[in-house]
Amino acid sequence: MLKLIILAPLVGATILGLFGKKMNERLIGIIACSSVAISALTAFYTVFGVLLSAAPGPDGVRRVSEHVMSWMRIGGISITDFGYVVDPLSGIMVLFVTGVGFLIHVFATGYMHGDESFYRFFAYLNLFMFMMLNLILGDNFLLMFVGWEGVGLCSYLLIGYYFLKKEAGDAAKKAFIANRVGDFGVVLGVLLIFFKCGSINFQKVMAWAATQPMETLGMSAVMAGGLTTIALLLFIGATGKSAQIPLYVWLPDAMAGPTPVSALIHAATMVTAGVYMVVRCNAIFTKAPSALLVVAIIGGLTAFFAATIGIAQWDIKKVLAYSTVSQLGYMFLACGVGAYAAAIFHVMTHAFFKALLFLGSGSVIHGMHHEQDMRYMGALKKYMKATYWTMTAGWLAICGIPIFAGFFSKDEILWKTFSTTALPAPFPMILWGLASLTALLTAVYMTRLMTVTFDGAERYDQKPAHHDDHGHGHGHDDHGHGHGHAFKPHESPLSMVVPLAVLAVLSVFGGLVGVPHILGGKIGVHNYFEEFLEPVIAVGHQVPGEHGAAPAGGHGTTAPAGEHTAAAPAAHAPATPAAPAAHAPAETHSEGLEFGLMGLSVVLGVTGILLGKAFFGKNPLWQPPTLLEAKYYVDEIYEAAIIKPIENVSREGLWKIVDVKIVDGAVNGAGRLVAGLGDTLRYLQSGFSRTYAAFIFVGAVLLIGYFFINKP
Amino acid sequence: MTIQQIVFIVFALIITAGGVGVLVQRNPLYSAFSLILSFIGLAAMYILMGAQFLGVIQIVVYAGAIMVLFVFVIMLLNVRDDELHPDRHKYLLYIGVPLGLGLIAEVFYVVTRVQIAPAITDMHATGTVGTVERIGVGLLTEYLLPFEATSVLILMAVIGAMHLAKREKE
Amino acid sequence: MPLLLFSQPFMDSPLIPLIIEWSLKIFFIFGGLMTALAYLTWFERRVLAYIQMRLGPNRVGPAGLLQPLADGIKFIFKEDIVPLDADKFLYTLAPIMSLVPALTCYVLLPFGDKFVMPGLNREIPLHITHVNVGVLAIFALTGMGVYGIVLAGYASNNKYSLMGGLRSSAQMVSYELAMVMSIIGVLLQAGSLDLVEICKHQAGWFGMQWHLFTYPPTGIIGFFIFLIAMVAETNRVPFDLPEAETELVAGFHTEYSSMKFAMFFIAEYANMVTASAMATILFLGGWMGPFVDQFPLLGPVYFTAKVGFFLFLYVWLRGTLPRYRYDQLMNLGWKFLLPLSLVNLVLTATIALFFM
Amino acid sequence: MVPLSWYLALSAVLFTMGAVGILIKRNVIAVLLCLEMMLNAANLALVAFSSFFQQTDGQLLVFLVMVVAAAEAGVGLAIVISVFRNRETLDVDESHLMKL
């Protein structure tokens, strides 16, 4: 069953990769989409049909697992067994990965229409799905890491899809290298886990982590090689994959890839792998307050930082890219304050609305004949009604307007940040402030994007002559007219609009699965999402004694008692009262405060929208500050501080001295030695085979004679 | 002297005569036939030692297949005698024969001096060692890997020989 | 004849009665066979003649029955010609090399089971010697027969002879493979390489236990492969390329005359008989037939009858089929018979494994 | 009863003849024949030991040696044919490019 989920995209990728060249677009589209569809349907069946009715395991987590084979057997000891498992966490992930993935596949059949290596694109895309599913469903760190590297590879391939453009190739390399830095952290982390725990199976590791004592807050824990070190190493990997400070620089550049790729990989799925990993390892992170603090700070900073850059970008996709970085920051912030369920909730809603926004922007780009610069758009509302309205849903969702999906998840993060007890005193307030400010900024830059793109005057013909730095690797310009003279943008084909519509619906209503208790509790609506995810997150959590009656349940959620009894044996274990319950905020805050904060965030969102509308409606071409437009010169700083020195050391030191003088010298010297020896010995080699035979014969006789003298 | 010893001597003489024939004949075809004679003698030796299967196989494989191949090639190339130009390595004769004598002396020394406890007094025809069953079981159990390896070797030899001997198309 | 000398009875039994027994058996079998071979030529010519609507030799003696004798006398008195450039030694050796293995085969053939000599109370097996690897021994000997032809072709110093010799060696080596492969199925069933054991394995059921019929259809396929390979192995029509009169002027024995030629001739017929006997033993139950248990001397009668059938088949084929071309011959051997026999072998093994 | 040493001595003689033959024969085919002779000498020793100790292993090895010999003869003769085709000679000393 699980194998089918995993294998369907692989089969698709194989077929397309090997035979796709001969197929027509229709067939390729059918194969690619149907393979993902099979995967998605199987996933839905597995989650809703099997997982929900499965009996909880001994640790209270429902699991559907499938053992594939014994992997890496060394001297009779099985290092790891290779298997797949669906539990609530990976269940949610697999649902939206396959679901959104399927929609984006469908979208891409329209978007990529006419591309000369259509089949290659879909082969990569299917391969990506396969790797992503491995990442999510693998039941051990190693298999997850295989998927982790695999999605990195596919990301590289797809960013560099238009490899004839230097920009795309450079971006691909940048993404790959930035990820490598992070992957190194993951490798070290996994090795450390194996070293410490003796297993890399998630279930075993988490059970092990649950038995470990709480680590202290401070530098000493970081360097101690315990859980904090593991957590930080893993987090380094997450910063690479999920584009956090300081490794976020690759994501905006990755927009050089085709737009469906940006939507699928660089917004909805792959970049959330870091969040997934942190949540998956929540038992480890919970025990490592220093790591949590780092995660929260990095997350909060990234969110704010990227949002400020997002305000100043002209490329429509770059805006969305920075927005993604910013939203990922939110998710890490949630992780950092111990609100893992909120993080995953935001991952899901973000997947809906960000995929929607990206696909919408793809639709716009498609309609504009591969123009990505917002300065040359405007008034598209008129021409692209469907795109406009669907994107509006995404816009409102990301701004956090109530009912829309983004509201619930973002608000939950803000509230949890404010109310957390996992961090020492001033941090929750500071981070909350930062996050709220970010929420305002988010609303502003998204409004700017919508306004500049869809409202105002038409600016299609203001393009300067040297415009060819965008989007022409596509090989798709069947319209016979270029820029510079008037043309009309057109609405996208049905295959693109339908996914947009589906995603729009999801963006609007998708958040209702996780309605906070204070809103839904009165009318009997539970926070289903959190309840579903609870057991996974509860694994290994120590619950402070005073919360014994409402264990692990978030702020007073009245979950069915039976489930919680089974949820976590550890949860009821006596624990040190001083240990903060990371995921369960103290009940000291009143409901009123929560309502107030919720209201504040709505106000912030609305303010941002109004501000944006008012300001950018008047002067859409407002010149942003250079510092922001140039992205704080981070790339330049990296160039000067890291890349150049490495290059110089490599060239001057490693190449000119170590390689040329020492390595080559040794090799050449060995060669010269052998040549000299050969020069003298070659007289033995006459070329007559009989002479050689004579040598052998003499040798044999002498050898036997030798054994007469030296009797063994 | 038992009858087996007489038989041994007779066939040892035949084998040796065949071997000498290989060395002294100038015509390769005569050499080949001398060797066949030698091989038939060896087959007789095997049967004398109770290895009936190998004895027959010796004739089937060596005399019946390998030597036919040799004779076939000799006839195909139709070379009558050694080529006439002078031997550049005459000295090999003067090295080779003494070396050979030395080797024989050494082996004789070993054979006469080293005592091996006589495990089985009657060496021939009593045991079941040489039967097809024993050899078959041995080949397909303990020696299965070498057996399979040699079959791969044969395959390679077949392909290699075909490739080498194939006349290239102009 | 090393096999004969070292076989177990020779080493252990009291010698004198054994030597007498053997001498008598050899005398009868070889005397009978040599006569039979001579009359086989008459048989062939008569049958061929009838097939071609002629009469054949019918003048010398009643119905031409003395014709073989006349032929023999003629051979003996012919001049023995040796070509000038021929290699004298090999030229003389060749017919011997051809004839000796062909005749040696007879010591291995079982003509019947044991019977008890009335009066002497001595159990006499109806075969000269009993070797536990009889099948292989027969193949070893027939394999040696190639040398006679090869040598004859080489030693005659005649290009037609050389061609004939080359073709012959290639053909015999090629078909020997298919032949051996085709009978492995039989050996698999019988579980022995011993000719007597193989015969005994086919006893009973009025012939339904013959290897031809057991393990259908592999027995029949194997039989036909064996039949074709057998004809090719003995260089008979339609595979008589080495001695193709019309192409190679009778091939390797162009230069031979007198008794040397007669030896080749006898060797060829002897090989035919051996091959027929092998087919009989391996596929048609050897000496087995009704009442053979009660009257062991019936064995040779059945055996002769079955062999006679194959000999007739040889003549029949000669009378009806045209000759193959050389490349067709090679293709048939390597690309059809050999793969087919391999498949047949696998099939036999499968049946043996799963159904028996 | 034939002692083991007789067989070993015969084997040694045969082997030595093969070895000497490789040195003194110039015809490639004769050299290959001598090689076969050496292999057979080894076979003889193996069979002798095998039946002396009543162990099958020696004879199994002989079987494998025969297979190897067949392969060697096949490839060797193919090489002879292709060399002859190129050089019109069978003299081993004529093919002396087996050096730097």
Image (cartoon, grey):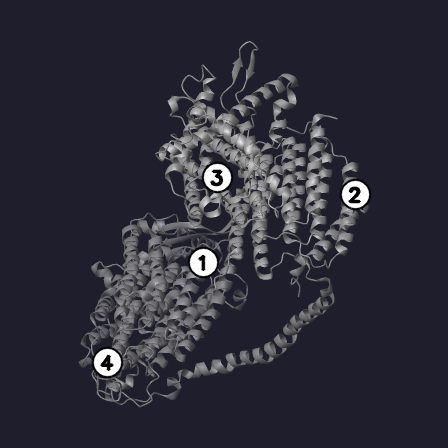
* Point 58% across, 43% down: residue: C151
Please say if the residues under marks 3 and 4 sit with CB atoms less than 8 Å apart.
Answer: no
To which residue does mark 1 refer? A141
State the CA–CA distance, disc 2 to disc 4. 97 Å
Secondary element at image label 3: helix
The amino acid type of the residue labelled 1 equals: Phe
User: Farthest residue in the front direction?
Assistant: C59
Same chain under badges 3 and 1? The reply is no
Q: What chain is tagged by disc 4? A: A
- Residue B105: which disc? 2
* Point 26% across, 61% down: residue: A513
- Residue A438: which disc? none
To which residue does mark 4 refer? A479
Q: Is residue A586 visible?
A: no
State the CA–CA distance, disc 3 to disc 4. 78 Å
User: Farthest residue in the right direction?
Assistant: A709
Report x, y in % for residue C135: 52, 32
The amino acid type of the residue labelled 2 equals: Ala
Same chain under badges 3 and 4? The reply is no
To which residue does mark 3 refer? C233
Q: Residues within 10 Å of mark 1 (few under 14, many from 20)?
A: many
Q: Nearer the viewer, residue A274 or A252?
A: A252
Secondary element at image label 1: helix
The amino acid type of the residue labelled 3 equals: Glu
Q: Residues within 10 Å of mark 4 (few under 14, many from 20)?
A: few
Report x, y in % for residue A75: 55, 49
A634 to the left or right of B91: left
State the CA–CA distance, disc 1 to disc 2. 70 Å
Please say if the residues under marks 3 and 1 sit with CB atoms less than 8 Å apart.
Answer: no
Report x, y in % for residue A510: 25, 65
Q: Nearer the viewer, residue C294 or A114?
A: C294
Please say if the residues under marks 1 and 2 sit with CB atoms less than 8 Å apart.
Answer: no
